[in-house]
Amino acid sequence: MKIKVCGMRDGENIREVAALGVDYIGMIFWKGSPRNVTMVPTHAGIIPDRASLSPLASHLSPQRAGVFVDEMPQNIITRVVNYQLDVVQMHGKESPTVIRNLRATLDPDIRPGIQFWKAINVGCADDLKTCEQYFDCIDTFVFDTRATVPGGSGQQFDWQLLDAYHGPVPFLLSGGIGPDDAERVKAFHHPQCIGIDLNSRFEKAPALKDVALLRSLLTQL
């Protein structure tokens, strides 16, 4: 099971979470989020270099996912370069054409092998029909709880709705997964589910994760 911890921007906190062996560190580049990386006065020292993320020489540091909401393509490209992103995660109304063009620009000339993920807000089974237009341009979906504004709501949706998803693209389960949900996560089975996305329910404050809570959940999975 892949583990992504999203909404991070503090260098030391990122190092602590990376030492837990998670697979992805998510950084939000959207001004509407209290976890927006660009809210801080300077970028210097926020995101540690890759070598410092490895607690052991043999441990591979987590990949970096940048979260964007209807952002200008040039701004996404700039963030990919500056933050050495491995994943571009789209949380807005980005069209398949925009995603295809971004991939062609970034891979292979700027960031070979970069992945593109698309968040899909789920409130009913019909919402999953949105996925079809992205099958040929997305590497992974992130199924999140439908909310009135972009980004996480901290609330869960009915995971049984995903029984209606039969697409070829794998997905991460997101939306309000908390410290007490280990048994619920283990009980969820879908052939295309490859992991979970954790955020606000593991925070001491916006963008500051409680490492002990994360460790507790991970030891139960």
Image (tube, grey):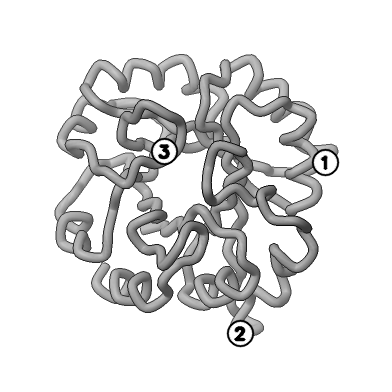
The structure residue drawn at horizontal position 45% and vertical position 37%, both measured from the top left corner, is 151
Q: Which residue is mark 3?
A: 142
Q: Which residue is mark 1?
A: 110
Front-most of 68 and 43?
A: 43
Q: Quadrant of residue 193?
A: top left
Residue 55 horizontal/vertical position (percent): 60, 82
* Three-letter code, disc 2: Leu
Is the residue under label 3 in contact with that under label 2 (CB below 8 Å)?
Answer: no
Q: Residue furthest right?
A: 109
* Inter-mark Cα distance, 2 to 3: 30 Å
- Neighbourhood count class around disc 3 (C-alpha, 10 Å): few under 14, some 14–19, many 20 upward: many
Residue 170 horizontal/vertical position (percent): 40, 38
Secondary element type, mark 1: loop
Mark found first going from the N terminus, 2 or 3: 2
The relative height of residue 49 versus residue 104 in the rendered view (above or below) is below
Mark found first going from the N terminus, 3 or 1: 1
Judge left or right: residue 79 versus residue 180: right
Q: Quadrant of the C terminus?
A: bottom left
* Inter-mark Cα distance, 3 to 1: 24 Å
* Three-letter code, disc 3: Val
Q: Which residue is mark 2?
A: 56
